[in-house]
Image: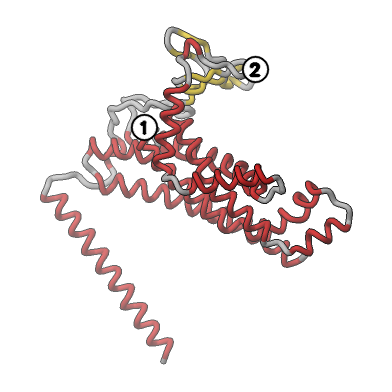
């Protein structure tokens, strides 16, 4: 009897959700038709008619389609999110260990870093780093040259790129007039976004790492020290592997937040998926389809990250259970 009642309730709930969805979709279609606004995804094959300031591996011109423009935006989003996640992980682990350091000054500096960056809105930090990079770096003619072939200026970072593998050839950027030609140019917008995302996310990861280390039983420290292990061996071989079981689930949430926060790139003019989709919506008037594309892409990326990290977390849990 209880199963039948539960089945009835679930059927009614499903029918209610379906009816609400049908109403909203039908209402949207009627309003679009009344206003003579086109619907559907046919616009993706039309000529975009605008340029994209930052393209790396995917060449793009105004004559290409909206679909290719969105693909460039997706690649730009994925590139900055991936690099930010890697950088945030490295910085966050270092900050978490620094907060537990017996060195008073180092621990206080790490604590100040966490408190400041966690409590300042990310978009404000992006504006700050964009202003710093744009105003404090010299013009291309006086560009900094930290490494051979690398030039840092207010136009961004110019670095060599691989032209061909067989034979192996590298193209080095060269100063030509008021800018660099050849190689790859990473814009100030990209640098500001990457720096802001990495430092902001690292502050949260640092606290997660600190909590994970503190969660390891004190007896593990004493047992390792009794075996004559050094402090670095103790942390690398004993503490961190056990702390991972506590750290991985909340770090997964930070990876997801970092990826979704990359959508703030529109605030500083970096051509990510959201920025290019906004331009597409303004030109075509098809806001529902454009927003649907954005939602679908971010949902797919988030689910992929979750699946990957959950798989890794299960393997860690199994190892811990066997131990």
| Badge number at residue 242 | none
Q: Quadrant of residue 262?
A: top left
Residue topped by disc 1:
269
Q: Earlier in the sequence, mark 1 or mark 2?
A: 2
Tell me if 181 is positioned left or right of 148 in this view: left
Residue 250's spot in the image, x, y percent?
Answer: 56, 57
The residue positioned 64% from the left and 20% from the top of the image is: 166
Labels 1 & 2 near each other (Cβ < 8 A): no
Q: Nearer the viewer, residue 177 or 128?
A: 128
Residue 315's spot in the image, x, y percent?
Answer: 67, 59
Answer yes or no: is residue 315 visible: no
Tell me if 240 is positioned left or right of 126 in this view: right
Q: Nearer the viewer, residue 247 or 28?
A: 247
| Badge number at residue 167 | 2
- Quadrant in which the C terminus appears: bottom right
Q: Secondary structure at mark 2?
A: loop
* Extreme residue toward the front, this view: 104
Q: Nearer the viewer, residue 31 or 322?
A: 322
Q: Nearer the viewer, residue 66 or 208?
A: 208
Tag nearer the camera, 1 or 2: 1
Residue 184's spot in the image, x, y percent?
Answer: 51, 22
* Extreme residue toward the top, this view: 177
Which class describes the residues within 10 Å of circle 1: few (<14), some (14-19), or many (20+)? Answer: some
């Amino acid at each position: 009897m209880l199963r039948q009642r539960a089945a009835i309730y679930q059927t009614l709930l499903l029918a209610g959700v379906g009816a609400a969805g049908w109403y909203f979709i039908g209402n949207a279609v009627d309003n679009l038709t009344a206003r003579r606004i086109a619907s559907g995804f046919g616009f993706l094959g039309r000529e975009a008619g605008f340029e994209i300031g930052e393209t790396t591996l995917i060449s793009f011109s105004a004559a290409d389609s909206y679909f290719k423009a969105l693909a460039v935006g997706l690649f730009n989003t994925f590139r900055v999110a991936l690099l930010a996640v890697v950088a945030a992980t490295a910085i966050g682990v270092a900050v978490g260990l620094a907060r537990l350091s017996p060195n008073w000054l180092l621990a206080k500096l790490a604590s100040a870093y966490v408190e400041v960056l966690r409590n300042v809105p990310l978009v404000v930090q992006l504006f700050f780093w964009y202003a710093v990079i744009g105003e404090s770096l010299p013009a291309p003619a006086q560009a900094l040259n930290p490494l051979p072939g690398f030039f840092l200026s207010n136009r961004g970072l110019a670095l060599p790129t691989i032209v061909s593998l067989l034979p192996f050839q590298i193209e080095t950027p060269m100063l030509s007039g008021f800018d660099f030609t050849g190689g790859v140019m990473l814009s100030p917008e990209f640098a500001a976004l990457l720096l802001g995302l990495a430092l902001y996310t690292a502050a949260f990861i640092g606290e997660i790492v600190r909590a994970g280390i503190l969660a390891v039983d004190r007896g593990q420290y004493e047992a390792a020290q009794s075996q004559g292990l050094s402090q670095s061996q103790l942390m690398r071989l004993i503490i961190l592997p056990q702390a991972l079981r506590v750290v991985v689930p909340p770090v997964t949430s930070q990876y997801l937040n970092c990826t979704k926060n990359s959508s703030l790139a529109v605030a500083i003019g970096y051509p990510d998926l959201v920025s290019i989709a906004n331009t597409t919506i303004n030109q075509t008037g098809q806001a529902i389809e454009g927003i649907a594309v954005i939602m679908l892409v971010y949902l797919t990326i988030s689910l992929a990250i979750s699946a990957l990290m959950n798989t890794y977390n299960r393997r860690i849990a199994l190892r811990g259970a066997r131990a």
